[in-house]
Amino acid sequence: MILYDYVLSGSAYKVRLLLALLKLEYRSIAVDFYPGGEHQKPDFLALNPAGTVPVLVDDDVTLCDTQAILAYVARRHDATGVWFPVEDPVVLGKILQWLAFAGRLTDTAGAARLHDMINRPLDIDRARNGAHKVLRELEAHLTERGYEGGSFLVGDNPTIADIACFPYVALSPDGGIEHDDYPAIRQWLIAVRRLPGFIEMPGIHALHDLNQELAQ
């Protein structure tokens, strides 16, 4: 597998994280998203006309949508079927619903992060307000389930729903969106960090480092 990647992209990190959790080998090709704008150059647009990262190439399969990549990797390379169980239509529907929810996180918290990090033009107040609305929905879901740090978005096992939603929630402070009012979300973020094989990215620390920060 080849992953066209950008180290600061939360979307690309979703794929890196799932590949790590599944212990899958791949080759990473760095895309100079910023400041180089390589994702808008003709060579890259020939690979992905949408001009977005990540892009996954697996044999003769090329996929450009992050959530589609997660679903593909889970179904093709996870022999256990745990990460994307499709046999139960209720579970499948709930996972697909969270994949759509992840898009709302990208459009709000992710957009606010890009505004603060690279000065991307944006109505920042609207983006932050939208992000808090989405986070309140997530907090309510986790609270309703009686979240105590041991369950995930769909059932008691992690699925690609958690991987899809985790990065832009964890990175939201980069866009001025803090987690102080979301105790259940904070516990869920820790639960994802506890998964065997969890990897970091800039702005998302491992649990050990996070514990050190909280103790200061």
Image (spheres, grey):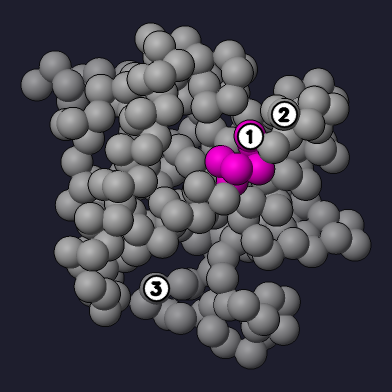
Boundaries of the magenta span: 94-99
Q: Is residue 162 left or right of residue 107?
A: right
Q: Main secondary structure of the magenta part?
A: helix
Marks 2/1 in contact by CB < 8 Å: the verdict is yes
For discs 3 and 1, the disc positioned in front in the rendered view: 1
Q: Tell me the residue at 23%/55% (across/down).
A: 129
Residue annotated with mark 1: 94
Q: Quadrant of residue 206?
A: top left
Q: Is residue 25 left or right of residue 171?
A: right
* Image position, residue 33 (x, y; %): 46, 72
Dot 2 amino acid type: Val
Give the mark nearest the N terminus, 3 or 2: 3
For discs 3 and 2, the disc positioned in front in the rendered view: 2
Identify the image quadrant of the C terminus: top left
> Marks 3 and 2, how far apart in space?
40 Å
Q: Which mark is residue 53?
A: none
Residue 101 can be seen in this image: yes
